[in-house]
Amino acid sequence: MLVKKRTKPLADIPRARFGSKPTDGGNLIVETDEYAEVAADPIAAKYLRPFRMGRELVRGLDRWCLWMADEFDPSDVAKSEVLKERIEAVRAMRLASKKKATQESAATPYLFQENHQPDVPYVAIPRVVSEMRLFYTAAHLSPEVIAGDKVYTAVDPDGLLFGLISSSMFITWQRAVGGRMKSDLNFANTLTWNTFPVPELDEKARQRIIDAGKKVLEARALHPERSLAEHYNPLAMAPELLKAHDDLDREVDKTFGAPRKLTTERQRQELLFANYVVLTEGA
């Protein structure tokens, strides 16, 4: 069966899109060794936000950005040498670009060139994950955490999308129809997300998936020192996390039409493609 790319989701789920793109020459990004200096500036510190690209998201690495898209006071630039130097450097970098859009964005050098940041809790989806993962390593983040353009985001105030993408059903679909980067799984909104054949959910089914997804987050929280990469090492997953995913799979499998929790990838593939046929025929 040929699964074709789509520009919008086949199912009744929010769109996934790239995170925000700085195009800043690194000047709006604050690395670990720069954090103390920026945080010591009381004006610049107001604009510090956690920043996540795919690497930071999966490996649990600290990185920050200067985010001035919300409640920015232009007079702060003159009061802060940190802001002044960094914003001037962004402007110079953008003006020197050969791209017209980048040159035009030099007019607002304090802003990321592209702002796609959700204003509600969202699911953050790394573009690439190891083929060895049993589950896709997504995170559920608050809007104060800024997602970069190596991460896809989808608004998810109640956690439904987190539950769906954390299920075996989703990673089975990713393996079946998604792209690859070398051997790793490569998420794409047009091919993987927009074609994911989620059936119509009644309120009870939605809530069961939301609740089961919360249990996954609670199981992760038992070991806050672990990164997503460590949580999802297939040779060392915590029993509590495995159980939470098992319970989540039971709810998602049932929602997709299984009479009981499925046990093989082949069973899930058959159900996924059956749902895909139903949804595409009605599209």
Image (spheres, rainbow, N blue to C red):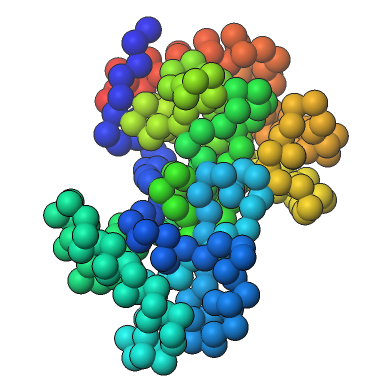
Which residue appears at 33% of the width and 56% of the height? 23
Q: Tell me where residue 247 sits by quadrant.
A: top right
Horizontal and vertical percent position of residue 13: 41, 41
Location of residue 32 with respect to 245 vertically, above or below: below
Is residue 80 among what the camera can see?
yes
Which residue appears at 26% of the width and 67% of the height? 92
- Give the side of residue 252 with respect to residue 224, left or right: left
Q: Tell me where residue 81 sits by quadrant.
A: bottom left
Quadrant position of the C terminus in the picture? top left
> Which of 198 and 200 lies nearest the eye of the viewer?
198
> Which of 33 and 108 lies nearest the eye of the viewer?
33
Quadrant position of the N terminus in the picture? top left
In the image, farthest residue toward the left:
100
Is residue 121 among what the camera can see?
no
Location of residue 280 with respect to 162 vertically, above or below: above
Horizontal and vertical percent position of residue 14: 39, 45
- Give the side of residue 74 with respect to residue 136, left or right: left
In the image, farthest residue toward the right:
239
All told, the count of numbered labels is: 0
- Give the side of residue 232 with respect to residue 209, left or right: right
> Which of 275 and 82 lies nearest the eye of the viewer?
82
Horizontal and vertical percent position of residue 237: 80, 33
Horizontal and vertical percent position of residue 21: 36, 54
> Which of 280 and 184 lies nearest the eye of the viewer?
184
- Give the side of residue 172 with respect to residue 277, left or right: right
Q: Tell me where residue 136 sits by quadrant.
A: top right
Which residue appears at 50% of the width and 49% of the height? 53
